[in-house]
Image (spheres, helix red, strand yellow):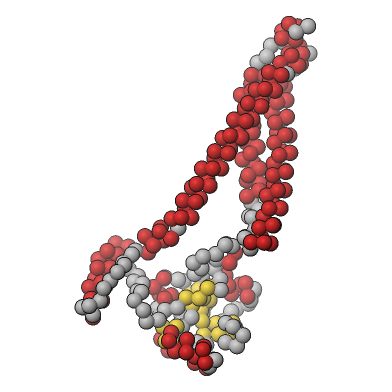
């Protein structure tokens, strides 16, 4: 579980309360006092309440109300749940199912980081006013960084976004290579079976029959490869989960990938199949 500190954190983040109450001023304790109490083992001077997310509440007490229940941080520090908020995502998680396992602790922090909530149209004005107010209280204060939450979110996910684009490009390139390979292989099949196709046409096979023959053959071969690939993907995912604690591969990815490969295979073989269907029956008599 990820815990968030800071007075008025819930109000500043705009989280939605679904049960109980938010943390009150009387609930808060100073961060330095909490650290000293934890080092001394004095549980009486540690926070006794917290607010958790709905996802965590449903995970710990499915079908029950979380209000009044206790959570232990460590072995001997009970915290009573006084409120439940709808969503409050964790900063970094591998598994989406655990993204909402977080809570708010009543710990007051005195540092130089401030989070200000304002209307979107007033962000720049309020930011400048906040800087002026800070310098007014301490003329020697130096404000090093000032960022909008949207900019921070964009910068935080920049590397992930770049990696996703890169991997997406690699996947597209591999799919193009696969499609070109199917086109080449299909053309080779047509060239090798030209006499066979002519014989089939001479025996009464229609162009549609020849077209469906090559499409069905491609579908069966693609199905064999897809089944092998899905089995390998599942096995590799189990290995990575066991040895590197990576999340489980979403089951929906496998059928989506299979359908995509089937469609690409059918589209790629369509050109060679149409050329095969255009082979005239006279080819069989020329080869006799």
Q: Is residue 216 above or below residue 82?
A: above
Report if residue 20 is visible in the image: no
> In the drawing, does residue 234 fall left or right of residue 76?
right
- Going 37% across and 82% down the picture, which residue do you hit? 110
Q: How many marks?
A: 0
Q: Is residue 168 above or below residue 276?
A: below
Q: In terms of image quadrants, where is residue 56?
A: bottom right
Report if residue 280 is visible in the image: yes
Q: Which percent across, then down, holds residue 43?
A: 54, 91
Q: Is residue 124 above or below residue 276?
A: below
> In the drawing, does residue 275 fall left or right of residue 100?
right
- Going 68% across and 14% down the picture, which residue do you hit? 279
- Going 76% across and 16% down the picture, which residue do you hit? 196
Q: Is residue 6 above or below residue 227?
A: below
Closest to the observer, 198 or 170? 170
> In the drawing, does residue 32 fall left or right of residue 247?
left
- Going 43% across and 55% down the picture, which residue do you hit? 158
Q: Which percent across, then down, holds residue 58?
A: 61, 72
Q: Which percent across, then down, holds residue 132?
A: 22, 73
Which quadrant of the rendered structure holds the N terminus? Answer: bottom right
Which quadrant of the rendered structure holds the C terminus? Answer: top right
């Amino acid at each position: 579980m990820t815990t968030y500190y800071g007075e008025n954190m819930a109000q500043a983040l705009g989280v939605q309360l679904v049960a109980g109450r938010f943390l009150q001023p009387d609930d808060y304790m100073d961060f330095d006092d909490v650290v000293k109490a934890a080092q001394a083992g004095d549980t009486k001077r540690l926070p006794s309440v917290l607010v958790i997310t709905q996802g965590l509440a449903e995970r710990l007490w499915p079908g029950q109300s979380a209000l009044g229940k206790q959570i232990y941080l460590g072995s001997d520090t009970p915290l009573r749940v006084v409120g439940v908020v709808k969503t409050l995502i964790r900063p970094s998680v591998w598994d989406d199912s655990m993204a909402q396992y977080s809570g708010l602790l009543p710990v007051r922090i005195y540092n130089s980081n401030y989070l200000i909530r304002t209307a979107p149209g007033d962000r720049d004005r309020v930011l400048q006013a906040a800087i002026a107010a800070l310098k007014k209280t301490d003329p020697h204060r130096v404000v090093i960084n000032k960022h909008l939450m949207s900019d921070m979110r964009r910068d935080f996910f920049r590397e992930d976004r770049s990696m996703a684009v890169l991997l997406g490009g690699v996947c597209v390139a591999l799919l193009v290579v696969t499609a070109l390979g199917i086109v080449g292989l299909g053309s080779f099949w047509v060239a090798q079976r030209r006499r066979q196709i002519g014989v089939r046409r001479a025996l009464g096979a229609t162009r549609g029959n020849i077209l469906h023959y090559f499409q069905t053959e491609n579908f069966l071969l693609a199905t064999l490869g897809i089944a092998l690939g899905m089995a390998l993907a599942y096995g590799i995912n189990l290995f990575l989960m066991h040895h590197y604690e990576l999340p489980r591969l979403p089951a929906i990815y496998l059928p989506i990938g299979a359908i995509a490969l089937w469609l690409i295979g059918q589209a790629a073989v369509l050109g060679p199949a149409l050329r095969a269907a255009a082979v005239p029956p006279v080819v069989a008599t020329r080869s006799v």
